[in-house]
Image (cartoon, rainbow, N blue to C red):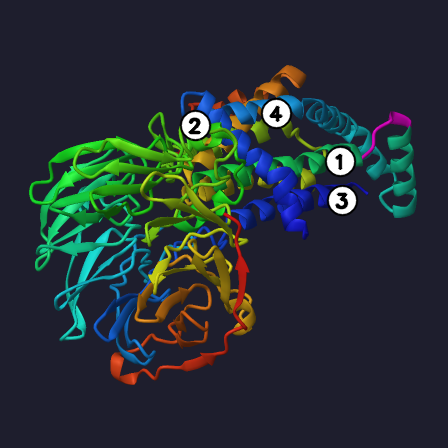
């Protein structure tokens, strides 16, 4: 048995069949099935997500102290590294604390993504491939083929409005979690990521079945809610001020030169 | 340290994005490539290659002519793997009637070719305002051609002009090739029903609830329609009324269901219906009463429709192993293993098999070859379809002789 078969057996197949069975119990609505399974997985993953959010918050809170150290030991890289490690140790913060929960969750999210993509079986080839991943459960066979119509969407085709929602929800999520860094370089890079990721996923959503885009939107909305209950609006608090700054007013309009 | 940390974060983010992009990228199942089988007419075999070429060859495996199926496949959208492709995937086996060959494209179009002119005659898009892929094949008869579409409609077209004579709406996609018998068209739908429609007028005669989607062609014989369904049952219904005669497994039976759905069209030989299943087994059922006549374990999913040669059923698995089955004798004979014999590890069979005399024609995918196999010995020779891309006069057929493995017969307990 190769790694692909092991992956299919223990991760992809349970996810695929759960999606189909849920669809059967939710009035043959594959859209609801995607939403409910995304919520269930987020609930199961909550302890890990919470750990990740706490670690990220702790890292962000340490930023001023780290900046101070960087300023103090700008010419001595060895000392800077040693002082930073000391600071991490004393604060009980581990840089890996942010990454580990993300890495642990990644296979589950990939399986959910693959499951949704496989179940929609857009082409006849993928339909045949799906047959190999089905359990011999009566509910699975009763639900197939799935009803891919949900709200205004055909979950097997791409949708422009949902692609915009993917980009917007991801941007909001990013904006909430990203705090302004004291280091201008890091702040610039963070800002770039904040904009690029939602744009990329938005564009990507135009070319994939909207069932996947629905999953991205729901996941982003759940993360926004979690983040709100954990640390409030975060970076979004400054949004009204930023928006106001963009609106031309008498004050910030360029002064016309007198002739 | 901070920079390193940021780099690791950025790296993780990019890696995750790369995983997402890769996962939804150009996997083999994300692109519609087609799996047309071969149709035998006279001394010729017609099929459509995975490169979108309608290929005519002699039954001895020499190429006669080829013509590209029009290359205007619908775009799959921005960044889609199928975007910009000029190939038209064809899943249904071409149908021949008189001088015409009919081909149904995944782009929602029907094409007719003139055999005498060796060129396209006409083409038509089924309902331009609601055009959806066509997965099944075309059935020709009585000057009309019948075809189902993923838009849920069953169509009757004029055989010459391809103008729509009538359309019949069902509640789901139609992926099966319709069957025609006694002035009635039979077609299964994703709405879990099989419809009997008047071939002349397009009005419904009856609808049978198959409790699962039906993508295989209903088989009509002696006043009975045999249906295989996604609910893992085989149904026999009266051709005139649509009333149930029997079902397999019988009602109330527990624990004897196939573990997968039926995708391929079954065949009948010597009073036995052979229904290949995606669970790697072929279910043999007595057509008289629906009782079991044998169970053949072929080891891998079967999605291609078998063919009957000299009373024996020739069936090919997806992994390209070809068996000869005989329920009366209770034997299963392995005739050919393409992956072993031709040293092609990738050969796959989803296409409908066809036969003339003792020769079986098998279109293998990925390697894209048409094999002519002797049904008794398993010896075969192949024509590489993938190499055929030019005009008919410039093509040189590549014929390779494939040595059969020694046929091994296993007696199957009924």
Q: Are marks 1 and 3 on the same chain?
A: no
Q: Is residue B366 left or right of residue B287?
A: right
**In the rendered image, which residue does mark 1 sit on?**
A100
Residue B81 at x, y percent in the picture: 43, 54
Camera-nearest label, 2 or 4: 2
Q: Tell me if residue B78 can be seen.
A: no
Position in image of residue A242 (x %, y %): 53, 26
- Viewer-closest of B200 and A77: B200
Label drawn at residue A31? 2
Which mark lies nearer to you, 1 or 3? 1
Task: Name the residue: 88% across, 41% down.
Answer: A80
Q: Chain of mark 2?
A: A
Q: Circle 3 sits on which residue?
A: B3
Helix, strand or loop under label 2: helix
**Residue at mark 2 shares a chain with residue at mark 1:** yes
- Is residue A91 covered in magenta? yes
Q: Is residue B51 above or below residue A40?
A: below
Find the magenta span and give its range.
A90-95
- Coordinates of residue B225 in the picture (x, y in percent): 25, 42
Kindly identify the residue that appears in the image at 87 percent across and 47 percent down.
Answer: A75
Instruction: Give the residue pinned by disc 4.
Output: A42
Depth check, mark 2 against mark 3: the one in front is 2
Image quarter of residue B290: top left
Q: CA distance from mark 4 to mark 3?
A: 31 Å
Instruction: Please determine if labels 4 and 3 lie on a single subunit.
Output: no
* Residue at screen point 42% across, 68% down: B368
In this orientation, which residue lies closer to the viewer: A208 or B279? B279
């Amino acid at each position: 048995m190769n790694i692909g078969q092991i992956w299919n057996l223990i991760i992809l197949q349970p996810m695929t069949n759960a999606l189909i069975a849920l669809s059967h119990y939710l009035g043959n609505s594959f859209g609801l099935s995607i939403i409910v399974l995304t919520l269930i997985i987020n609930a199961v993953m909550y302890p890990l997500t919470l750990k990740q959010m706490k670690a990220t918050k702790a890292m962000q809170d340490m930023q001023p102290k780290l900046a101070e150290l960087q300023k103090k030991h700008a010419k001595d890289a060895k000392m800077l590294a040693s002082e930073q490690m000391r600071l991490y140790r004393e604060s009980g913060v581990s840089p890996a604390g942010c990454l580990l929960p993300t890495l642990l969750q990644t296979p589950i999210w990939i399986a959910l993504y693959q499951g949704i993509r496989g179940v929609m079986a857009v082409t006849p080839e993928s339909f045949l491939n799906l047959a190999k991943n089905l359990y011999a459960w009566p509910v699975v066979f009763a639900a197939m083929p799935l009803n891919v119509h949900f709200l205004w969407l055909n979950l097997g085709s791409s949708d422009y409005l949902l692609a915009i929602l993917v980009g917007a929800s991801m941007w909001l999520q990013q904006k909430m979690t990203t705090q302004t860094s004291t280091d201008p370089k890091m702040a610039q890079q963070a800002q770039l990521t904040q904009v690029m990721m939602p744009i990329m996923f938005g564009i990507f959503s135009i070319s994939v079945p909207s069932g996947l885009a629905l999953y991205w939107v729901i996941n982003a909305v759940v993360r926004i809610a979690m983040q709100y209950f954990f640390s409030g609006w975060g970076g979004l608090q400054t949004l009204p001020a930023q928006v106001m700054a963009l609106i031309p007013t008498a004050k910030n309009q360029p002064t016309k030169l007198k002739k | 340290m901070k920079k390193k940390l940021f780099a690791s974060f950025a790296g993780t983010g990019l890696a995750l994005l790369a995983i997402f992009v890769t996962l939804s990228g150009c996997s083999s199942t994300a692109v519609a490539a087609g799996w047309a089988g071969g149709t035998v007419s006279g001394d010729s075999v017609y099929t459509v290659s995975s490169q979108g070429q309608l290929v005519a060859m002699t039954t001895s495996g020499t190429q006669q002519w080829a013509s590209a199926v029009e290359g205007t496949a619908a775009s799959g959208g921005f960044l889609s793997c199928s975007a910009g492709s000029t190939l038209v995937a064809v899943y249904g086996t071409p149908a021949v009637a008189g001088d015409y060959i009919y081909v149904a494209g995944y782009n929602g179009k029907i094409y007719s070719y003139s055999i005498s002119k060796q060129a396209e005659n006409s083409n038509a898009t089924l309902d331009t305002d609601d055009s959806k892929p066509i997965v099944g094949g075309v059935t020709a008869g009585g000057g009309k051609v019948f075809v189902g579409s993923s838009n849920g409609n069953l169509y009757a077209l004029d055989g010459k002009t391809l103008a729509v004579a009538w359309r019949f709406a069902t509640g789901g996609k139609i992926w099966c090739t319709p069957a025609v018998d006694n002035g009635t068209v039979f077609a299964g739908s994703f709405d879990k029903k099989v419809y009997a429609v008047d071939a002349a007028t397009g009005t419904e005669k009856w609808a049978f609830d198959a409790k699962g989607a039906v993508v295989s062609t209903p088989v009509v014989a002696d006043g009975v329609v045999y249906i295989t369904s996604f609910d893992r049952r085989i149904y026999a219904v009266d051709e005139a009324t649509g009333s149930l005669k029997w079902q397999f497994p019988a009602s109330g039976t527990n624990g004897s269901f196939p573990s997968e759905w039926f995708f391929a069209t079954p065949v009948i030989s010597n009073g036995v219906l052979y229904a290949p299943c995606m669970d790697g087994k072929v279910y043999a059922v007595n057509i008289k009463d629906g009782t079991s006549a044998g169970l053949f374990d072929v080891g891998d999913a079967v999605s291609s429709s078998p063919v009957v040669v000299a009373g024996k059923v020739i069936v090919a698995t997806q992994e390209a192993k070809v068996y000869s089955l005989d329920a009366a004798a209770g034997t299963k004979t392995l005739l050919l293993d393409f992956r072993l014999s031709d040293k092609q590890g990738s050969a796959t069979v989803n296409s409908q098999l066809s036969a003339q005399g003792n020769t079986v024609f098998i279109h293998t995918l990925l390697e894209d070859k048409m094999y002519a196999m002797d049904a008794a010995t398993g010896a075969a020779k192949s024509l590489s379809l993938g190499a055929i891309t030019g005009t008919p006069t410039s093509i040189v057929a590549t014929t390779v002789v494939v040595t059969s493995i020694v046929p091994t017969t296993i007696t199957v307990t009924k």
